[in-house]
Image (cartoon, rainbow, N blue to C red):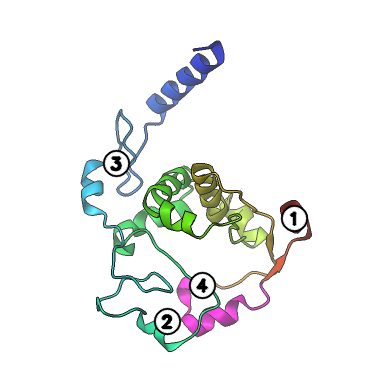
Amino acid sequence: MDRKSKYNGWLETAASLLYPARCPVCDEVLGTGALRMCPACRQRVKYLSEPLCCQCGKKLSDPEAELCGDCGRGRHLFTAGRGLYEYEDIAPALYRFKYGGHREYARFFGREMSEKLGGYIRSLKPDGLVPIPMYPGKQRRRGYNQAALLAQALGREMDIAVYPDLVVRNRNTRPLKELNCEERLNNLKRAFNLGQNGVKSCF
């Protein structure tokens, strides 16, 4: 091991002593070892499993159905969607990641997505990952864009290019959690454009 590697190892050890890793789900200290989630949360957190909606990836109650009620009633502008967890189990971690300043959760979620959804993602043969941008003022207040951090973490895990500047946000929008499906669509109209610098870097 060279001197630089030893130095980096000491820094990581010191950092882990001063700022011990915490379980992203319950926020308890993990202690030593390579755990990413505490054993109790690992047992409790449920991953989405079949049957799933063929389009949006939502959990289905009817094993014979192909589409959920929402997808069966209307046409979406995307080909397919997939989720990783049952929302109720992971909601506190998502909240802390988005609003609590826990940027380090991006690495956790990126690894989890790579391990659990990597096969599906590779089957799509993606040319790259494009995180949805935040409105600049909102990003300045929050300090980061969690979508961009997650895309970068997943891109590193799966060796997929990330294009954070391909799409730019033109205007601020209302939080989607406050809106129904129709309001969400209207809320996002004319909110995004292709970024010239982003397009040049991709092609």
Q: Amino acid at mark 1?
A: Phe
Point out residue 113 in the picture as x, y percentages from the top left corner: 42, 51
Q: Position of residue 97 (x, y in %)?
A: 45, 52
Query: Which corner quadrant of the image does residue 54 belong to?
Result: bottom left
Residue 82, located in which quarter of the rendered image? Answer: bottom left
Q: Which mark is residue 28?
A: 3
Whole-number angstrom distance, CA of label 1 to CA of label 3: 45 Å
Q: Is residue 39 left or right of residue 187?
A: left
Q: Amino acid at mark 3?
A: Glu
Residue 83 within the magenta-colored segment of the rendering = no
Residue beneath label 2, please?
A: 71
Residue 9 rendering spot, x and y as whole percentages: 46, 20
Q: Which residue is mark 1?
A: 203
| Marks 1 and 2, the one that precedes in the sequence | 2
| Residue designated by label 4 | 79
How far is the residue under mark 2 from the one under mark 4? Answer: 11 Å
Q: Secondary structure at mark 2?
A: helix
Disc 1 secondary structure class:
loop
Query: Is residue 157 something that shows in the picture?
Result: yes
Camera-side residue: 203 or 96? 203
Q: Which comes sooner in the sequence, label 2 or label 4?
A: 2
Q: Is residue 108 above or below residue 48?
A: above
Q: At 36% across and 84% down in the image, what residue appears?
A: 69
Q: Are marks 4 and 3 in contact (CB under 8 Å)?
A: no
Residue at 67% x, 59% y is 136
Choose the circle earlier in sequence order: 4 or 3: 3
